[in-house]
Image (spheres, rainbow, N blue to C red):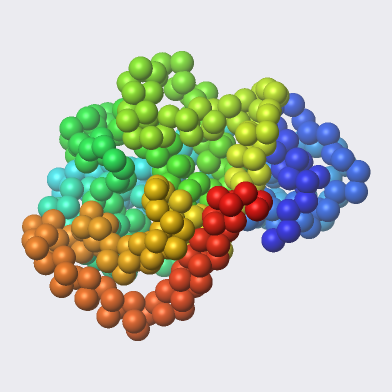
Amino acid sequence: MEYKEKEIALLIELLRTALGGPAPTLPENVDWEHLYALAVAHKVEAMACAALSDTQGVPQPVMDRFVHTYKKEISAQILRRNEGVKILNAFEVNGIDCVPLKGWVMQDLYPNPAMRYMCDLDILFKPEQSADVQRVLEALDYVPQELGGNPEVYFKKPIMNIEMHKRIMRDKTDHFDRTWERVVPQENCSHTFSMTDEDYYIYMIAHFFKHFHGGGTGVRYICDTEVFLRAHGDTLDRAYVDGQLERSGYLEFERKARALCGVWFRGDASDSVLNAFAQKIVCSAVFGTGERQADNYVHNAVEQMHGKTVQVKKRRYLLSLLFPALAVMQDVYPVLRKAPFLLPVFWIIRAAQRLFTGRDRAKEMISRADKVAQQIEREENGEE
């Protein structure tokens, strides 16, 4: 969709209002249709509605539309919350160790939980309990959609999508591989755990980083960062957090995210770097766009092969698509964790699967690899 500066600025102001800031000042000739579409694309229409409800000058049809969406989201979130409680209780009773993640954690930090959109219920569990998870979820009328990989996905009509994660992230350290060593049991629970505030913040930034450099993120990630830091920022062990972020390569990104929170929510001064950072965030939908994701993924992969010609970078990137590294393949085919020597066999299996289901995607990525390689070559030659 097209992004208009006036409506972008107004949306940011509405987010600030929703999180306790002053009432927004409406500019003249607002394109309300575009503002609504922008809020929907970033999944912050509930936040926008909360801010607009006390704002003078909003056309009633516009307000009615936002309120209708807000009420639908409240109903959906009540259903998700109730189902989530049932699932966590069932896991507790059946001895399944689990850690709720993402929206389940973040919703309670917002002024109103309905402000924080949650599409899936994400839960970390121990891979050896996969069969128990399936048994319990099927008893609750959930239907397996994807099993064996990471995450394992279950669905229950009308809207419940459950993503069961065997591991939560992969970075260049072993920090996330040791998550279970640092979790703490929730109150009155023996099998339901929480990450520490420090570890959750590191995970949140890592997840933000992953999407930012993948398909894009959307404004909600900055809202999450602001809300989390308001709740826990004063008590975080910054030495621990900064040390791990630096080892993982996320520290500079986290500082930029915090600085943008200051610009958006406290009126801090911006600069060209933060403006470019904000522009990329705003011009992405909440999970990014397919086109942006392809461009970002290819650009990062090609650009990171230092000391090689652009054409060599492109060829190596295309080979990495055909023959992913063992760590990547183990997430898709967990059997490789026990039998890594089977990697060549699963390269063939993966290629056969892609031949029948992913031709268009493969052609698109090859085309984009060529396009991005040409762009990087122009940049290196000083042509743009």
How many discs appear? 0
Residues 56 and 248: in front is: 248
Furthest toward the right, the residue is 28
Rendering coords of residue 52 (x, y %): 75, 41
Residue 26 sits in which quadrant?
top right
Which of 28 and 314 lies nearest the eye of the viewer?
314
Q: x, y (%) of residue 303?
A: 46, 51
User: Vertical placement of 375 versus 242: above or below?
Assistant: below
**Where residue 302 sits: x, y (%)?**
44, 55
Q: Is residue 69 left or right of residue 121?
A: right
Residue 7 in view of the camera:
yes
372 relative position to 27: left or right: left
- Image quarter hosting the N terminus: bottom right
Residue 150: which quarter of the image? bottom left
At x 27% / y 80%, what residue is drawn? 352
Q: Residue at x 78, y 57 (%)?
A: 33
Asked if residue 82 lies left or right of residue 256, the reply is left
Farthest bottom residue in view: 356
Residue 336 rendering spot, x and y as whole percentages: 14, 61
Tell me which corner region of the image, top left, top right, bottom left or bottom right, holds residue 189: top left
At x 33%, y 66%, the residue is 319
Q: Above or below — where is 72 with respect to 220?
A: below
Q: Residue at x 46, y 16 (%)?
A: 234
Asked if residue 332 is positioned above or below residue 111 in the image, the reply reads below
Any part of residue 192 in sight: no
